[in-house]
Every structure is written in C-alpha cells, then in structure tokens.
Image (tube, coloured by chain):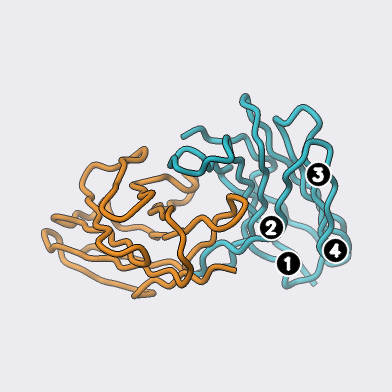
Amino acid sequence: GQQLNQSPQSMFIQEGEDVSMNCTSSSIFNTWLWYKQEPGEGPVLLIALYKAGELTSNGRLTAQFGITRKDSFLNISASIPSDVGIYFCAGQLSEDSNSGYALNFGKGTSLLVTP
Amino acid sequence: DVKVTQSSRYLVKRTGEKVFLECVQDMDHENMFWYRQDPGLGLRLIYFSYDVKMKEKGDIPEGYSVSREKKERFSLILESASTNQTSMYLCAAIGALGVAFFGQGTRLTVV
C-alpha cells in the first residue's frame, strides 16, 4: 500500500494552544479518516470524511477533506493534556473495500501537551 | 460500531516458537486485516482477508501466515518467531462506509 505524507512528525505544545496537522497523497482518495492512538492501545476513529471539501467537527476537533481529494487536515482547538497521543490519517482508495490496499496510513503525528 | 477484540494484550515468546495471535469481531463484516506497528515505520499491512478462507498478502507477509475459518475470527500465525518480529500487532475490521475499527493491540516480545 501507499504511505501517506503526514506532518508534522511530532508536536510539543502547551495546554490551551491550537494544533494543526495534515496529510498529503499523490493519489486521489474517496475517504479520509483520522484516528487517535493512546499509549498501549489500538487506534480509535475520530473523524471520517467522505466528500471533497467536506468540513466536519467532533467537539474540539475539526477535519477537512481537501478539494483535490489528495489531502486532509485535522485541527484541535484549545488542547488539553488528555489530547496526548499519536494521530494517524488514513486514505481509502475505493469504496470497494475488498482490497487490503484500500486503506493507506500516514506515519502519525505524536502530540505532547504540557499543563 | 464494530468491536474488535484481540486475545492478548502482551505476549512474551521464545525464538523459534510458533505463535498465534487471535482477533474476533462482533459484526458480520467480511474484511479483516493484520498490521504491525513499529516506531518510525507506521502501520504496515501483513495480511488481509475479505471472506472466510480467503487471504491476501499485504506489504510484509514474510514469516507470517493467517487463518480465517469463521467470519468473525482472523488469526495471525508466526511460524517460527524471531526477535525481529518483536512489535505491536493490530487487527482491524472494516465496517460500514469503509471505516476501519481496530483491536486494542498485542505487544509481542520475542526473546
């Protein structure tokens, strides 16, 4: 499968700051997904995006599906210590998920938040 | 949401042992996946299955095999464990609209 370009690799911020991370791809995707993984746990879905240009919020999190269908960003507003974790983007090539290459992942953004 | 359960959170095995990692999903979804996760390398696909008894190789299948005898269960097998297979293993099932749901992960250490 294709590895997505996710940046930044890591962020070290103070509580209350806003955070922004993004993913880019050389391929077009039909779906963009954002996951959070806490230490020792599996990734948990935060936001799913299905339409180019779509902007979706989940509490303090906002994500957008890029208009070119080759990128997506995730913003976290007013960060708190429990936002700590690794955030992954994933792009899906096809609505037909009978392919292991349907989901492609970024390498993750590691977020640290100090009180 | 799909619930995906991996049988062990932590495993320690000896080099050369045959290791079984089990994964069960509680919904009737066809597509299941095994990934390994290593620092700096992200998630890498080992094997996937889109139906009972069907399996396909992912990006790094060497040293692994899988079994899918029932729809809800997808097993990853390390035929002869080696130290370079020490890793976090993640199972996932794809639910409605193509969203992947992950298990809690198995941290495997091979000594």
Residue that carries the numbered disc 2 in the rendered image: A111
Question: Around disc 1, counting alpha carbons within 10 Å, would you say few (fewer than 14), some (14 to 19), or many (20 or more)?
Answer: some
Q: Are the residues tagged 1 and 2 within 8 Å (C-beta)?
A: yes
Residue that carries the numbered disc 3 in the rendered image: A64
Q: Secondary structure at mark 2?
A: strand
Protein chain holding label 2: A
Tell me if residue B51 comes above or below residue B101 in the rendering. Answer: above
Which quarter of the picture shows residue A71?
A: top right
Chain A tint as drawn: cyan
Q: Are the residues tagged 3 and 1 within 8 Å (C-beta)?
A: no
Residue that carries the numbered disc 4 in the rendered image: A60
Q: Secondary structure at mark 3?
A: strand
Specify the label residue A83 is tagged with: 1
Q: Amino acid at mark 4?
A: Arg
Are labels 3 and 4 on one chain? yes
Q: Are the residues tagged 2 and 3 within 8 Å (C-beta)?
A: no
